[in-house]
Image: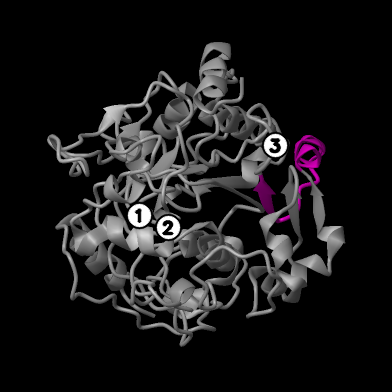
Amino acid sequence: MRSAPLALLLASLLVSSGARGGEAADCPFEAGALPVDTLPEGAPHGDAIPIDHIVVLMQENRSFDHYFGRLRPRGKAAAEGPPEGASNPDPLGGAPIEPFRQKAACEVADVSHSWNGSHAQWNGGAMDGFTSTNAVGADPSGARAMGYYTKRELPYYHKLYRTFAIGDRYFASMLGPTYPNREYLLLGTSFGRIRNGRDLFDATKTIFESLDEAGVSWTIYSEQIPFAVLLPYVAARPEHGASAAQFDADAAAGTLPAVSFVDAAFFGDLTIQSDEHAPTNVQVGQAWVAGKVDALLRSPLWPRSALFLTYDEHGGFYDHVPPPPACIPDDIAPQLEKGDVDAEFDRYGFRVPVVVVSPFAKKKFVSHVVHDHTSILRFIETRFDLPALTRRDANADPMLEFFDFQDPPFLRPPRFKRPKVSPKLMEECMEILGKV
């Protein structure tokens, strides 16, 4: 066993200093490594972790600074927001564009978050390409990428994140779009993919196969079509699928499986789409998430549950923290096409929000340790003593520091006021997006 998570400490120091390149992640462990072989001495794993029900909600396309750069601390817990004077150049030649409060619940257009766009935004660590990659006809300066929300627009989220354990060094798994990043959550790799694609692929072993081999129950709940159905292993097992409404019912009945993934609605009109993908109404997603969290809080299973809420990638929105180096997951190179940025899977994507909702979640806690989507994967593997799928999750920190298993702060679940979707902001969204 290693005596300390040295790789994570080094990566955290590198990103805190804003290092720009040339450094590499320390990756001592390989695919197949068991948690007991990778954890610090004495760290809990398997049945020593008193959590029997893990719920994962992955929303869409929001960076940490965009949602929580103005998150106000309580007590000593403080998350790192953008420094004073942070900005990006104005592509039109004007004064630098600083972060600004986005009072509308919708953007005028989507924001660039492709492989090429993300690498340009990172720009070797300068973090100054967000405006230039988003200069479009409706927004010629790309200023929308610099907008942020506050507790006025997202009151429920701000209270949730100020109550439970969060991280301000949680990154997407790669500099790129939705599909590859979600694949890291389920596979520990994107199997070379750098683009979105709906083709079924039987690329590598998934977390679902590992769970089945260990006799661990799982269900994928969804409002429409779950992302994981792109995996042949999941597509061939429809009995593991259920509606998002069934999640509420199963939580109330105390019949949730050991592992649940819950997917929001990703298409439909502005009143339906709840995945928070720009340019849709962020308050719709907030209200949907609140319903799922509340279902767990009220469930008889709450005393032994944990819910992870995060976002697949930054969606093109500004964040000031340069992504640190990451372990290359496997020996499969990025599937580059002509004109693509020549890069490897050796760097995380941008920071995204994460919160752990559990009776064992530390109260008002902010982790400053580097994590990514494979950290949630590694937590699942750690709880059920499953082998790592790839080099990336083998070396991922499993987020145990978010929990207090000895003295759980929230055995009595807190209650939150269910958020509403502002009719005024919805009307503005309709006007902004030309829906009226």
Helix, strand or loop at disc 2? loop
Q: Foreground: 264 or 362? A: 264
Amino acid type, residue under disc 3 in the picture: Gly
Q: Foreground: 434 or 234? A: 434
- Residue 74 appears in the picture as rendered: no
Label 2 with label 1: CB-CB less than 8 Å: yes
Question: Which residue, given by chain and number where applicable, does mark 2 sit on?
Answer: 172
Q: Residue at x 51, y 36 (%)?
A: 279
Amino acid type, residue under disc 1 in the picture: Phe
Tell me the CA gap for discs 3 and 1.
27 Å
Is the N terminus in the top left, top right, bottom left or bottom right quadrant?
bottom left
Q: Furthest-front residue in view?
A: 137
The mark closer to the camera, 3 or 1, is 3
Numbered mark located on residue 268 in the image: 3
Q: Position of residue 306 (x, y in %)?
A: 58, 47
Question: Which residue, given by chain and number where applicable, does mark 1 sit on?
Answer: 350
Residue 147 falls left or right of residue 410: left
Helix, strand or loop at disc 3? loop
Q: What segment is highlighted magenta in the picture?
A: 244-263
